[in-house]
Amino acid sequence: MNRFLYNLSIRALSPGLIVWMSLRARRAGGHWEVLSGPRFGYYPQPSRLRNPIWVHAVSLGETRAAQPLVQALLDQGDQVLLTHMTATGRAEGARIFSDAIARGQLAQQWMPYDFTGSVRRFLEHYQPSIAVLIEREIWPNIIAAARRMNIPIMLASARFSDNSLRQSLRAGRVMREAYESLQAVYAQSWLDAQRLEQAGAPAVRVSGNFKFDVSIPMDQVERGRAFAAALHRKVVAIASTREGEDELFIQAISKHLKRASAQSNELDPEILFLLIPRHPQRFDEVAGLLAKSGLPFARRSELAADHCGTTSSSVRVCNHVAVLLGDSLGEMPRYYATSQVAIVAGSFLPLGGQNLIEACAIGTPVVVGPHTKNFEQAVADAIDEGAALRSPTPDAALQLALQLLNDPPRLNKMSQAGTHWVQKHTGAVARVVAGLNELKSLKR
């Protein structure tokens, strides 16, 4: 397929794609503005940014991954335009960079749909000096328009699976031209780099994964550990659960509590389970599943604001429930710091897995499921380093976590392995910023 056929195809399919986006927005909740002017490159006011560095982070995961890069750019005085496709990504960006937004150093905007007119208007309006695409966001028209306007494009912290390579090769010339037009590509691993070069990307460098450069808010970690000490219970976090997994983990918790009750004639007083859904739009749904199961639970949103501190009311509530539903945003470091073991979900159904690096950085031993293709290199390395273990099912993962709780020396060894592994792999952001600054100097 060439770009002419690509444009014919997306125009023919655009009504269906817009309907799909609208349905997705309705299911997910939040402000998506699917038919708003900015989605088509129309803006009511001139941009307040002057030749910003444009960073595109499509969704929630990419926005969090881009955080250390964007912060490094802000710290060196750059203006940043941060774009998204999803409401959750945009909301997270607004939360993380609220100070930079308030002082006018960073602005957020929707990524326009990949129509020729939309992307041309977008680039003419913002006139970015350089574009940085996070992980895997390649759109032929916007890359072609940037090339015509002499805007260098970098693909950073790139991951590229076998399936992505097959799809790119099937798409033909249109995708090959897009990859060939990238001025700089920084891959997460050697495997990603090899696949990207097969797709047409030039001179791919391996920088590592931005997620290793995560900035851990130590105030949250300290509060989480203080809460764990005040609680006098062992805590297992079940983090980043996706649709279909919550039911399986609730069943596994129920099964464990029934076994404990049969042995001691009471609910297991030793363990508190933190159940933390990946997406905020599912908080109420998971609360309904917990209520239906009959498990005694509390919602984080209903506790005192300084949960993970030592508030007596929060401790009292959490001492009388089996499950604390983590229905809050931006508190994952607290949850991990509260826990002695973290089961990182998104990996127990074929969903690709979720990021385990943050838990390891905090020193929390990790258990993952069998489906981790989105983080295949990181998971394999963490397992090799002794920081993580793999388990086939939610029930087996829960049993493994409980076994670890009864083996403090092994827990301590895994904790140390996790922090050491993360420290060993930091530096991806510095390498990418250095490459970006090279592009800036060449453009002057």
Image (cartoon, rainbow, N blue to C red):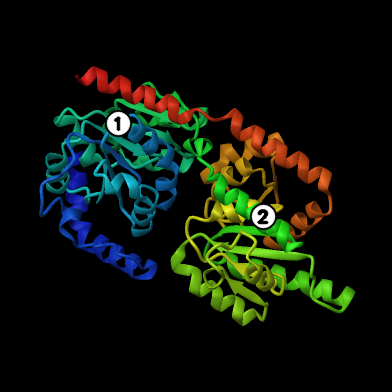
The residue pinned by badge 2 equals 226
| Depth order, front residue of 113/228 | 228
Above-or-below relation of 17 to 46? below
**Does residue 347 appear anywhere in the picture?**
no
* Residue 289 picture location, percent across and down: 58, 76
Residue appearing at x 38%, y 66% in the figure:
28
Picture quarter with the C terminus? top left
**The N terminus, quarter of image:** top left
Q: Quadrant of residue 237?
A: bottom right
Q: 31 or 300: nearer the eye?
A: 300
Determine whether the residue tagged by mark 2 lies in a helix, strand or loop. Answer: helix
In this view, 226 is above or below 186: below
Say what amino acid the circle numbered 1 marks: Gly
Compared to residue 153, the image places residue 403 above or below, namely: below
In the rendered image, the residue lying farthest to the right is 263
- Residue 255's mark? none
Left/right placement of residue 423 relative to residue 432 reads right
Where is mark 1, residue-wise?
77
Q: Viewer-proximal residue, 279 or 308? A: 308
Residue kind at label 2, given as amino acid type = Ala
Circles 1, 2 touching at the beta carbon (< 8 Å) = no
Would you say 92 lies left or right of 123 here?
right
Task: Name which residue lies at 60% across and 80% down.
Answer: 291
Residue located at (47% from left, 62% from top):
279
Q: Residues within 10 Å of mark 1 (few under 14, many from 20)?
A: few
